[in-house]
Amino acid sequence: MSHRCHIGLGSNQAEPRAQLRQACESLAALAGTRLLRCSRLYRSAPMGPQDQPDYVNAVALIDTTLTPLALLDALQAIEQQQGRQRKAERWGPRTLDLDILLYANQQIDSDRLRVPHYHMHARPFVLYPLAELDPDLILPDGTPLQHLLQNCPAQGIEAIADMPAQG
């Protein structure tokens, strides 16, 4: 059975635009997974320490037969392949960050995974690319994405490039 999932992508190291493009190609190559589309690329100021480069973010929409934890493992493997090193600093610079924002209409709260993604409701760099892909989305708790957008101004983010067509 296939599940529709939204994946958040972010990078501010080692050519961020190229990192996100490569990540979308890697998502498309995952077993049991089909990349449906990716949002445009957005630039935003970093969360946490401000002495780091701006982030480039996007959201990918996939259909996958992977379980939530198998998808998480696959995303972490892609991060490692692209040079991600996990450090104690929570919001520090990184080559690639891949997050499961939504996994079908499921709500998951385990030691390893929380879906919908923690604090996505307050992050314009997540909500605006998500709305680009799925403007009529209703979150698992029944909240319309449009309601979240009304409470999360786009200030500080800007669309900077289209993601190349997938095929």
Image: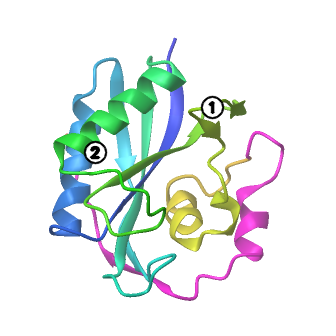
Closest to the camera, between mark 1 and mark 2, is 1
Question: Is the Cβ of the residue at disc 1 closer than 8 Å to that at disc 2?
Answer: no
Amino acid marked by disc 1? Asp
Question: How would you rate the neighbour count of disc 1 (Cα within 10 Å): few for under 14, some for 14-19, many for 20 or more?
Answer: few
- Residue lying at 20% horizontally and 58% vertically, measured from the top left: 19
133 to 6, vertically: above or below: below
x 74%, y 47%: residue? 138
Q: Nearer the viewer, residue 130 or 20?
A: 20
Q: Quadrant of the C terminus?
A: top left
Q: Is residue 146 magenta-colored?
A: yes
Image spot of residue 32 (x, y percent): 34, 17
Task: Residue 17: give its label.
Answer: none
Name the residue rendered at 57%, 88% in the picture.
155
Q: What type of secondary structure mainly makes up the magenta span?
A: loop
Provide residue 62's location: percent of width, then percent of height. Answer: 42, 36
* Side of 69 relative to 153 (left or right): left
The image shows residue 124 at horizontal and vertical percentages of 58, 72
Residue 27 placement: quadrant: top left
Which residue is at the far right?
A: 142
Residue 77 vertical placement versus 161 (above, below): above
Mark 1 falls on what kind of element? loop
Task: Write down the residue under mark 2.
Answer: 79
Q: Amino acid at mark 2?
A: Glu
- Counting residues from the start of the chain, the first of labels 1 and 2 encountered is 2
Task: Look at the image and give the residue range highlighted in magenta.
Answer: 139-166
Residue assigned mark 1: 111
Position of 8 relative to 46 (above/below): above
Report if residue 130 is visible in the image: yes
